[in-house]
Image: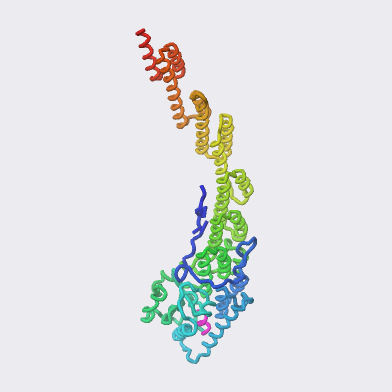
Amino acid sequence: MKRKAVYPPPFVFFRAAPAPLPAFLCAALLLFSAGRAPAQNAAGSGGFPRIEPDPGALEYAGKQAGGYTWEDLAEISLWASGAGGGQGNPAAAGGNAYLGRIRDAAAELGTDPDLPVGSRERGEYVLAYMHRKFLKSYSLNQTRVDTLLSNGRYNCVSSAVLYLILARSAGLDVRGVMTRDHAFAVVYAGDETVDVETTNPYGFDPGNRREFHDGFGRLTGFVYVPAKNYRDRAGITPVELVSLILANRISEHERQNRFAEAVPLAVDRAALLLGRAYADTGAAETADSEASFSEAPFFEDPRRDMMNRFFNYGAFLLKSGREEDCLRWAAFAGGRYPDEKRWQEFVFAAANNRIQKLVKAGRVEEAQNFLAANRDVLNSAGYNQLDSMLADTELFGRASRVKNAGEAEALLADIETAYGSVRLGAERAEELRTFVILKTAALLSAAPGRDWLAAINYINNTLARYGSNRELEQALQNYHSNRITDFHNRFAAAFNKRNFEEAEKILAEGFGEFPDNRRLADDKAALDRVKNRN
């Protein structure tokens, strides 16, 4: 009866699973997280992950209306990387240092006498500059901008974000592009749009570059998706591109079973993309808000993604056997981010697992007390299901321990009460009732001398009380057969001793109970033949 949970994580036990881990960018969700920002990973109430958005997320989200400058995007990218930087996390000195490096690079580009005037040429120049100055080695899972600046390791997300920042500092209109497992940039140059595969120094307008095609696939493992394949790619806004840093960090945490660390990052990402409406009303209530995010098929609704992280963390707690913490987590996070159906599934799974543990340990009364204490947490359907399971468990346990007809009578009455109060269904009530009656009949017939008649009378009485029952009727036939066999054996013993008078009395008793029985009739015929010969 124990059920498993995660969604696509659950939950473990509920067999609702944890929402699936997001198969995200640059080869299956990964990103090496070299550090953690205290603000982003701070614990929330009661030792749970933080579920309130970082102030930096709301500050950066508030700038959406006026549009993001390249410096804004630089700050956000470092904040999303966990390095801080800028007003979003002024305490992170390292983040400010990285921001200084980006500003220096932008200044160097802006004063470079060789920087072309035309947008197309300038976009290609920025890509070459970035590879010459920063990008040293491709690393499939390295999504953080601070790490890129520190050691030159990059992947599609970190390189695309840095290109976005530097190209915008040079006056270019640059945005993001997503495929199912990859990200790159696009430059708007007048009436022309040019793809930029930032992982490759020859990635500017890759469809027309032989050098690019010779090296890109071997380097990254990805295939370039040209603009004409519009179903396989989708444009995203600059801040959405930057938010993929958080998305990949979340995926990396979950891949390593660090579900608690994924939660606050998902909260911050949703707040960054959805803004103040999100912070004021909670995720579920913003479903119809005007807060915008990409409708690209590969860009999951950040609210849904955040809720999946909540339930993946819950499924982790459940799998760890921490049912009490599961219920506390549901109260803590569910109050802030309501989702009646999914939270109820989660709460039911936690309560079910806890009750199953107690029942297996023989602590049924404790399980009943636990259920009563959590009645207000469960909806009526969930409570009734668990209450029925406990009623069934308690009654079946008693049935297994029945020792006499008196105990059986009390138990049968309790089964009827449970059925009448809908704690037991009709089919299960009959199963339990049948089990009790059959066991009691067996106890009666096991009395000294094999008292088949007591069992027969008991079953006849219960059939009269409860009505037709195929199993009881079959048992009754077996007891009849045993009773008749007793008469026959007693008759045979007297007959063989030539005690014909005793044999005749035994047959008379047998015919009194089974007047039409053929075996007894054959015994009587044998007795009559002997008597006639004498």
Q: How many marks?
A: 0
Position in image of residue 490 (x %, y %): 44, 18
Question: Looking at this view, is 86 or 492 the one in front?
Answer: 492
Residue 275 position (above or below residue 448): below
From the image, which quarter does the C terminus lie in?
top left
Q: Where residue 208 sits: x, y (%)?
A: 37, 81
Q: Which residue is painted at 49% across and 82% down in the image?
A: 134
Question: Is residue 57 or residue 200 the one in the foreground?
Answer: 200
Whether residue 339 is visible here, answered yes or no, is yes
Magenta span: chief secondary structure? helix
Residue 499 at x, y percent in the picture = 43, 12
* Residue 412, percent from left and from top: 56, 33
Segment colored magenta: 164-170
Q: Is residue 510 magenta?
A: no
Judged from this view, the residue extending furthest toward the front is 497
Q: Residue at x 36, y 8 (%)?
A: 532
Q: Residue at x 59, y 74 (%)?
A: 60
Q: Is residue 199 above or below residue 257?
A: below
